[in-house]
Amino acid sequence: MPSQVNVPLPPGYQLDEYRIERQLSLGGFSIVYLAFDKDDAPVAIKEYLPNSLALRAEGDALPSIAEENVATFRYGMKCFFEEGRALAKISHPNVVRVQNFFRANETVYMVMHYERGRTLQEHILRHKGDIRESFIRAVFARLLNGLREVHTHKLLHLDIKPSNIYLRNDGQPVLIDFGAARQTLSLDTPLLKPMYTPGFAAPEQYNNARRELLGPWTDIYSVGASMYACMAAAAPQAADQRVERDQLIPAVKRWPEKYSRQLLETVDWCMRLNYLERPQSVFALQKALADKERSVPKQADSLFGHLRRKVRNLIK
């Protein structure tokens, strides 16, 4: 399906009780705006508008949807709406706060608390190769508090990466831009491009037929990859490539002089290709990050070849 670009709603547009100020970001699945509510308080509004299914032209508010895409568009809209409703039940300082969700312009919108600060990705680019262990431990310990709350509500994020980890001005991290609805839509609609992020997506996210393999360990792989990116100032090798030919240098071998062995082993533990060998819960990972003396489970070397072949078969 040819790529197309959606035109955002213009500044000053009145969307329900919100006034659009400007576009914050535009992706293949949605557009995010800075807006102001009726009390003139700033909010972030995410608009469901996958550019492979719908096209909005200059001057239009309603998107144009081809007949053959209507059912898929509506299914994605339902997933997006349900995700917003589930997130609205979560109130945690390290998870983006969903304040409202509504329908308009033949699509759906999610209204979130507007955060001030910068993304972890921006922080990485600003401090290339000079991010301290104390910073990594502090940021991810707090972030995991939020992720644990998400998992408690039977939700998965499925798109954790440095650009989806927001650092408030006080240093507190916030999980933003959940990818579960995108993942569901791409799994159920083979015509759509995959909506995971190479380098941060776990191996099991590449297999449309085995969604039952997705679990807390899937988000944990992404957390490990994000910690690895803090150290490398770049995304690690994509998991599907690792399954075929693993060229990722383990953290313990790459930075033995810069970070503690326990932290490096924890990162490698999170990024094991076989989901059964990763931490199975956020709590298990939190314990490892909190206790610098805690040893990380060894990889089952005798089973590794068999498990790698099994994972390779799963994502083909």
Image (cartoon, rainbow, N blue to C red):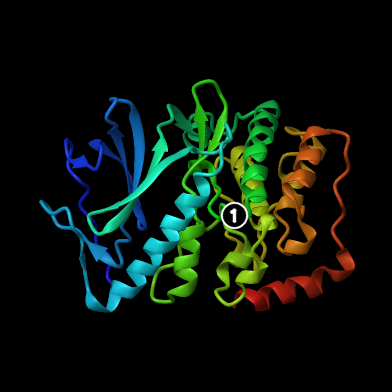
Nearer-the-camera pick, 242 or 193: 193
* 55 with respect to 221 (left or right): left
User: Which residue is the site of mark 1?
Assistant: 156
Q: What is the quadrant of the C terminus in the image?
A: bottom right
Q: Is there any visible trace of residue 124 in the rendered image?
A: yes
* Picture residue at 58% right of the left edge, 35% below the top: 92
Secondary element at tag 1: loop
Circle 1 crowding by C-alpha within 10 Å: few under 14, some 14–19, many from 20: many
The percent coordinates of residue 172 (x first, y second) are 57, 27
Q: Amino acid at mark 1?
A: Leu
**Does residue 217 sit above or below 11 in this rendering?**
below
* Picture residue at 53% right of the left edge, 52% below the top: 159
Query: Residue 204 appears in which quarter of the rendering?
Result: bottom right
Nearer-the-camera pick, 167 or 212: 212
The percent coordinates of residue 11 (x first, y second) are 18, 37
Q: What is the quadrant of the N terminus in the image?
A: bottom left
Q: Is there any visible trace of residue 250 in the rendered image?
A: no
Nearer-the-camera pick, 187 or 75: 75
The percent coordinates of residue 78 (x first, y second) are 41, 63
* 150 with respect to 296 (left or right): left
* 215 with respect to 112 (left or right): right
* Picture residue at 89% right of the left edge, 69% below the top: 302
The percent coordinates of residue 218 (x first, y second) are 65, 57
